[in-house]
Image (spheres, grey):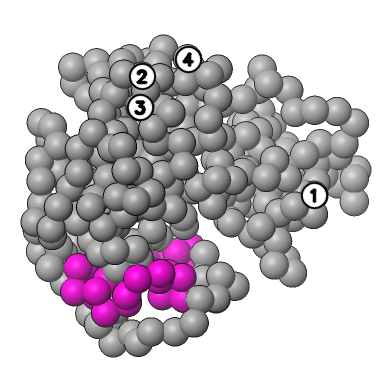
């Protein structure tokens, strides 16, 4: 198997969070409740995909036999694509359940960080080299672990909703209630209680939807989905939040904390979000079960 994978493998710390499979589709898949490397990269582009998987994995489980992963091949922060204003931070943290985090670049040359990667001074320097970071926007309590540290390092404002304030009690700005709030030019916070009491969706430029853990793109189902089996607060509240919000927002990119990202025409995303709200209204509370999530 080593010759087939050129020494790449997944160690037994894998938590099946799906992040590596997002960055290296066709090279990494799932078997027996964990990721596995299928084959070696065939060209430089595929090699970059495997290194992106390795440097995003929160347990550092994507490895290559015979030595440490070459830091010179760390691709992060990594753009969504040419002409896009969002970059993946990579370096997902075990203290945020391995969640994805993002940098949102603004026309002024500044940036906002949505949720956070693992804490590292070297990473902070790398992100800040692209432009000053003015705000750290937390989507909910599960992703708050490094928020204050990054905000202080950048001299940025830390945001969280009052429903999850105990996870970041020293936040600089506290979102309240369920009405949208303008964060900055082109950026709006939409409180979305459900996954947690203080979950928030951040919308930028009517293009980018940072959905936290409220909903995500499922490759298995080829649709927007909610993690109904991992809803800490209330699936009924999540359904109400989606119903209230679906008609208020337009976006092309869904950029979740957990689950895959996807870009579709805004009209199609609007239709899918309305349909998701309707499906969620039919759901009922169920026990927490991480294994039931359909990535």
- The span shown in magenta is 218-242
Q: Which residue is mark 4?
A: 125
Q: Residues within 10 Å of mark 1 (few under 14, many from 20)?
A: some
Image position of 25 with respect to 90: above or below: below
Label 2 residue SS: helix
How far is disc 1 from disc 3 in space, using C-alphas?
33 Å
**Where is mark 2, residue-wise?**
154
Contact between marks 3 and 2 (CB within 8 A): the answer is: yes
- Disc 3 secondary structure class: helix
Q: Are marks 2 and 1 in contact (CB under 8 Å)?
A: no
**Image depth: mark 4 or mark 3 in front:** 3
Distance in Å between CA atoms under marks 2 and 4: 9 Å
Residue at point 50%, 47% (across, down): 96
Q: Earlier in the sequence, mark 2 or mark 1?
A: 1
Instruction: Answer with mark 4 or mark 1, whichever residue precedes in sequence.
Output: 1
> Going by the picture, which residue comes out furthest to the top?
129
Q: In the image, which is nearer the foreground, mark 2 or mark 4?
A: 2
Q: Which residue is mark 1?
A: 11
Q: Is residue 137 left or right of residue 258?
A: left
Q: Earlier in the sequence, mark 2 or mark 4?
A: 4
Between the C-alphas of marks 4 and 1, the distance is 30 Å
Q: Mark yes or no: residue 201 visible.
A: no
Of badges 4 and 1, the one in the foreground is 4
Could you tell whether 8 is left or right of 110 in the image? right
């Amino acid at each position: 198997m080593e010759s087939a994978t050129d020494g790449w493998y997944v160690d037994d710390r894998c938590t099946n969070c799906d992040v590596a499979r997002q960055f290296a589709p066709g090279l990494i898949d799932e078997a027996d409740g964990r990721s596995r490397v299928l084959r070696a990269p065939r060209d430089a582009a595929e090699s970059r995909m495997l290194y992106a998987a390795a440097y995003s994995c929160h347990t550092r489980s994507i490895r290559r036999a015979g030595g440490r992963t070459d830091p010179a091949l760390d691709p992060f922060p990594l753009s969504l694509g040419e002409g896009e204003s969002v970059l993946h931070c990579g370096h997902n943290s075990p203290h945020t359940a391995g969640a994805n985090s993002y940098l949102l670049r603004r026309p002024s040359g500044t940036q906002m960080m949505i949720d956070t990667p693992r804490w590292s001074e070297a990473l902070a320097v790398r992100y800040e080299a692209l432009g000053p970071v003015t705000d750290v926007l937390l989507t909910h309590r599960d992703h708050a672990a490094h928020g204050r540290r990054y905000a202080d390092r950048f001299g940025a404002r830390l945001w969280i909703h009052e429903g999850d304030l105990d996870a970041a009690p020293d936040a600089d700005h506290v979102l309240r209630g369920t009405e949208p709030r303008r964060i900055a030019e082109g950026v709006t916070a939409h409180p979305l209680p459900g996954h947690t009491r203080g979950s928030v969706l951040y919308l930028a430029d009517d293009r980018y939807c940072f959905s936290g853990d409220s909903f995500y793109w499922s490759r298995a189902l080829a649709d927007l989905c909610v993690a109904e089996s991992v809803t800490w607060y209330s699936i009924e509240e999540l359904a109400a939040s989606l119903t209230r919000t679906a008609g208020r927002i337009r976006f092309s990119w869904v950029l979740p904390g957990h689950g895959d990202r996807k870009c579709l025409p805004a009209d199609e995303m609007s239709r899918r979000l309305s349909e998701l709200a309707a499906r969620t209204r039919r759901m009922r509370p169920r026990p927490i079960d991480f294994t039931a999530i359909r990535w």
